[in-house]
Amino acid sequence: MLTGPRRAAARLGRALSPRGALALQSVDGALSFALRAALAMALPALPMALAGRADQAVYAMLGSFTTTFGRNLPYARRARVLAVVAVAMTACVGCGAALAAWAQPRNGGAGAALTVVATALVAGLAKLACDAARLGGLGAVLLLFSFAVAANGASTPSDVLPQAGLAACGAAVAWVLAMAGRLVHPDRPQRLAVAAALRELADLWDATGRSRGGASGTGPGGATGTSPGGKSPGGTYSGGAYPGGAGGPGDGAGPVRHRATAAVLQAYRTLGVLPPSGAEWRGRGDTCVRLTDLSWSLLVGSARRPPNDPTGLARTLRRQVRLLVSRRRRAPRLLPELALPVLIAQAGMLARPEPGAGAGAGAGAGAGAGAGAGSRAGSGGPGPVPAGPTTLRAAELRAAALVTGPAHGRAAVLLVPALRMVLGTGLAGGAALLLGLGHGYWAAISAAAVLHSINVRTAAQRAVQRTLGTVAGLLLALGVLALEPEPVELVLVIVLFEFLLEYVVARNYGLGVVFLTPLALLMTDLAAPSPAGSLVQDRALSSVLGVAVALGCALLVVHDRAAVRAERALAACTAASERAERALEEGDPRSFPLVQTRLAAAAVELREADDAAAGELWPAEIDPTELAAAERRAYLLLDRLVRRG
């Protein structure tokens, strides 16, 4: 057992581990999204470049970054989110241009120092807002980039409104293009959300199949492994001893089960419905709703008994994913292999009796929803009972309250990463100013990119990705600048890099940096041409400085907020489980959808909170077996709710 300095060293090594930095994620719809982002940048920028105002086209490009947000949100919510982001992006450019005109940071002195402070404050506010709104991706970094570019430009008072107007124009074009898909594929976001849930479920069955093949022992109820809770690669525990080896210790399926649960909940949120209950299990709604019900029932049913042929079922689900993400079918069909008789035989689950029928007449205990849906794939079937806005919102708010605690508690969790962001960007920008680096705001942006993370471990991963990606990106930029392209050609190259950036960044941030680096550098050259060697040197030195300062801030700002979050998540999961047990005792199926949603959200938050705490230098002092037992209890209760519904 490690004690004292050795334990601290082990904790530091675990937190700074770059493991996972080079992992690739599966992403659906990346090509169409990248094309949309490139078009949003090209439409306002190219005409200006052709008119001889390429230097002003940069501000329209900054506004077009609006399209990066809300990647796969449903169209109704996307319209609201992107409208707010468009205003924020325009405000960043307008405020930055006003600061540049007033403080003249290019002349150094107090104006430059004031710009560094303002940049740090904008970084912290952007981080806080994006985390509170749960906006992933580059998020706060793009808002900061827009402000920093405008604040370090050569603006005059007469330029402020035109530059803000150009940013607003670019943001408006991005908004229109983001909403244009509604005319062609109105259900595209829903299909992608359901496809993501099926893909994660297929990964879970693959992990279950591998654990069966490598199992060396049997635990309670047939679970493989040797202990009730094991260490996972990221967090404290691997998910507990699930029956049948589904997510049991040492099999690596615990994190996969967590991702599958989160993806299915996200699919329900995207569809605007809650998990079914009662007669709804017999099949409801269109193919997307049926497939989500299928995912839910298979997921929670596997806590009791996993499929007999998990690998075969995984192959079938991935075939269904390909149909969902294909643009050639406006109404995706349900595969025959997911029909009731085939699914029950393949999943190895007992048949679920329908109301008034015998034991073998209905859908499977773990496959009730999807099986019933599959048998009615060719017919309309009863439509889902949509959760009314009030009911659905109340469920989401209640689930959020369960897993995050009071508003002041959630604010405390969000404030620490924002504080890190303020300190990191401020120190990096100040150091660059003192060292006399040209384009010193790049150091602040590099620090922000590393600190736009969850904890110390993800900051270390970002540092590795940022460093490797910057090296490759600088080589690309140097090659482009060596050709001395004309302004119009430079705009076309920037649009190309924007397309490549959006195509790969969701797969791996490091790959995105390969194209983000030349994109940012070429936009700077477009606004104010400089010698290629000087630009590349400034970018390299600023990146090294920013990454180093960011890692230092991540290590020095030690806090217990992540540990408190884990403890709160454990208490919330326990409370949600107790509420589920009371609902089962009361026997009113009408309450089951809300109870299931809250319990599943609590189980997802439990693992996320534990993983976040494990990546900090101040981890949660909670027994891993207690966490594993709480998660296992939650999934078994979800299975009982499904079978009793």
Image (tube, rainbow, N blue to C red):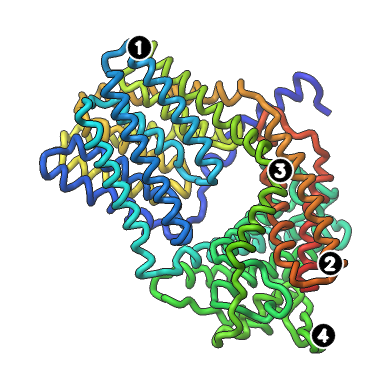
Q: Which residue is mark 2?
A: 584
Furthest toward the front, the residue is 390
Q: State which quarter of the image contains the N terminus.
A: top right
- Residue occupying image coordinates x 83% and y 45%: 625
Q: Nearer the viewer, residue 6 or 147?
A: 147
Q: State which quarter of the image contains the C terminus.
A: bottom right
Q: Which residue is mark 4?
A: 359
Q: Is residue 22 left or right of residue 114?
A: right
Occupied quadrant, residue 558: top right
Q: Which residue is mark 1?
A: 110
Q: Earlier in the sequence, mark 1 or mark 3?
A: 1
Q: Earlier in the sequence, mark 4 or mark 1?
A: 1
Cβ–Cβ under 8 Å for marks 1 and 3: no
The amino acid type found where label 2 is placed reads: Leu
Q: Nearer the viewer, residue 123 or 461?
A: 123
Which of pointers 4 and 3 indicates the residue nearer the eye?
3
Q: Earlier in the sequence, mark 4 or mark 3?
A: 4
- Gap between marks 3 and 2 measured at Cα: 25 Å
Label number found at residue 405: 3
- Gap between marks 4 and 1 measured at Cα: 80 Å
Q: Secondary structure at mark 1?
A: helix
Q: Is residue 5 left or right of residue 395?
A: right
Determine whether 489 is above or below 387 in the image: above
- Gap between marks 1 and 3 measured at Cα: 43 Å
Determine whether 305 is above or below 573 in the image: below
Occupied quadrant, residue 336: bottom right
The amino acid type found where label 1 is placed reads: Ala
